[in-house]
Amino acid sequence: MIEQGMTILYVSDQEASRIFYESVLQIQPALDVPGMTEFRLGNGFILGLMPIDGIKRLLGKDIFPKTNEGNPRVELYLHVRNAEQFLDRAIQSGAEHILKVSMRDWGDRVGYCLDLDRHVLAFAEASR
């Protein structure tokens, strides 16, 4: 049985990413130490921020493709109460806008942006 879920984003600047996510999510990290920042997002889910240099030391540099740098490799899809508000805060905090919040064919209203490290952030309102 899985007791808890965590997604860890590898970031180029842990402090800048912490400030970005504090602003966007409007919550303080539950943990903020050199090498890891954690935000508790509800239902036992944790968003972690780890410096890319730290994970390279831990796992080895050979697992990181050099040709893919800068291309999005993860999407963080968050169900929220006001997707426009979250998307606006993200853009004001330095995110790159991709798509405005609108109804998608799977039934959610969703808006998209890229965070400081080009991770895709989706802010969704479930219509179900």
Image: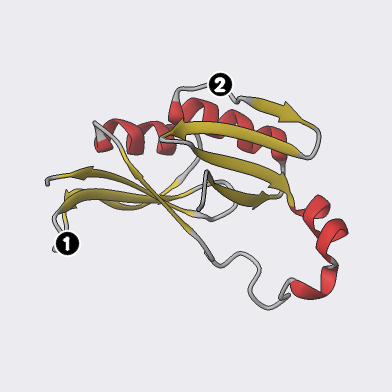
In terms of depth relative to the viewer, which is nearer, 69 or 105?
Answer: 105
Q: Is residue 72 depicted above or below 27 in this figure?
A: below
Q: Identify which residue, 41 or 43, lies in the foreground.
A: 43
Q: Give the image location of residue 30, x and y in percent.
A: 61, 25
* Left or right for 41, reference 46: left
Q: List the residue tagged with mark 1.
A: 106
**SS assignment at label 1:** loop
Q: How far apart in space, not on screen, are marks 1 and 2 (Cα)?
A: 32 Å
Give the answer, above or below, for where 10 lies relative to 88: below
Left or right of 96, for residue 62: right
- Going by the image, does 71 lie left or right of 125? right
| Secondary structure type for disc 2 | loop
Which residue is pictured at 60% across the width and 52% down the height?
117
- Type of amino acid at the residue the image marks with label 1: Trp
Find residue 48 and report its horizontal and vertical position in percent.
61, 42
Q: Nearer the viewer, residue 87 or 82?
A: 82
Q: Amino acid at mark 2?
A: Gln
Q: Tell me, for residue 21, which label it has, or none.
A: none
The residue depicted at 19 percent of the width and 45 percent of the height is 126
Is there a contact, CB below 8 Å, between mark 1 and mark 2? no
Count up the numbered dots: 2
Residue on which the image places disc 2: 28
Q: Residue at x 55, y 41 (%)?
A: 47
Q: Is residue 40 above or below residue 50?
A: above
Name the residue: 24% across, 49% down.
110
Q: Residue 28: give x, y in percent of width and height.
A: 56, 21
Residue 119, compared with residue 30, is above or below; it is below
**Of the residues under marks 1 and 2, which one precedes in the sequence?**
2
Residues packed near mark 1 inside 10 Å, few (<14), some (14 to 19) or many (20 plus): few
